[in-house]
C-alpha cells in the first residue's frame, strides 16, 4: 500500500485501465438468435421435393405423432453412425438422409411390396 493514488486515478501504480478491458473481438460473433436458428434448422425434419410429391401421390398424411416418431428414429440412426436409413412404419417406408435429417422418398404399403431397398446402411423399425 505504498503506492500513491491521485485524484482522477482509479488504479494504483502504472496499470492502465485499457489493459483491464476485455477485447470485443473475443466475443462470439454469433448472436443468440442466429445460434438458436442454426440449432433449430439442424434438428428440424425436412422433406425433399421428391418425397413431398410421393406423399401426395400416394395419399400419405403424417400426423404430429408420426413426425415425432420419424424424428426419434433419425436420432437413433444418427447415434449409431448411419448415413442413409430405411424407416419402416406400420404401412409405409421412408428413405432418410440422416445427416441432413431429410426424408428422400416415401412409399405406402402397396408400393413397398416386392421392392428392393438399395443405398442404405441401416433400417429403423417403428411399431
Image (cartoon, grey):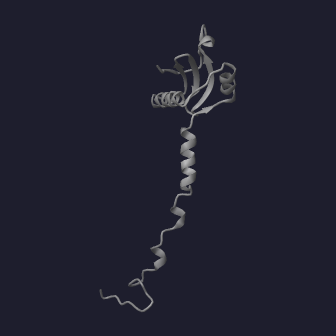
Above or below, 32 relative to 64:
below
- Residue positioned most to the bottom: 7
Please tell me in which quadrant of the rendered image residue 46 appears: top right
Q: Residue at left 53%, top 58%?
A: 28
Above or below, 16 relative to 57:
below
Please name whichever residue, 104 or 66, is drawn nearer the observer in this view of the structure: 66
Question: Horizontal and vertical percent for residue 126?
Answer: 48, 21
Please name whichever residue, 20 or 55, is drawn nearer the observer in this view of the structure: 55
- Residue positioned most to the top: 114
Q: Residue at left 53%, top 66%?
A: 24
Q: Residue at left 58%, top 22%?
A: 94
Question: Horizontal and vertical percent for residue 21?
Answer: 47, 72
Please tell me in which quadrant of the rendered image residue 6 appears: bottom left
Question: Horizontal and vertical percent for residue 99?
Answer: 55, 33
Please tell me in which quadrant of the rendered image residue 108 appears: top right
Number of callouts in the render? 0
Question: Horizontal and vertical percent for residue 62?
Answer: 58, 26
| Position of the N terminus by quadrant | bottom left
Amino acid at each position: 500500500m505504498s503506492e500513491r493514488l491521485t485524484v482522477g486515478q482509479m488504479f494504483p501504480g502504472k496499470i492502465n485501465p485499457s489493459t483491464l478491458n476485455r477485447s470485443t473481438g473475443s466475443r462470439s460473433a454469433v448472436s443468440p438468435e442466429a445460434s438458436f436458428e442454426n440449432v433449430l434448422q439442424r434438428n428440424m425434419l425436412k422433406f425433399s421435393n421428391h418425397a413431398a410429391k410421393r406423399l401426395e401421390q400416394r395419399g400419405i398424411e403424417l400426423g404430429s405423432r408420426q413426425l415425432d416418431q420419424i424424428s426419434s428414429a433419425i436420432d437413433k440412426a444418427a447415434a449409431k453412425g448411419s448415413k442413409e436409413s430405411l424407416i419402416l412404419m406400420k404401412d409405409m417406408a421412408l428413405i432418410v438422409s440422416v445427416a441432413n435429417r431429410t426424408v428422400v422418398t416415401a412409399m405406402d404399403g402397396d408400393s413397398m411390396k416386392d421392392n428392393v431397398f438399395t443405398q442404405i446402411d441401416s433400417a429403423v423399425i417403428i411399431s
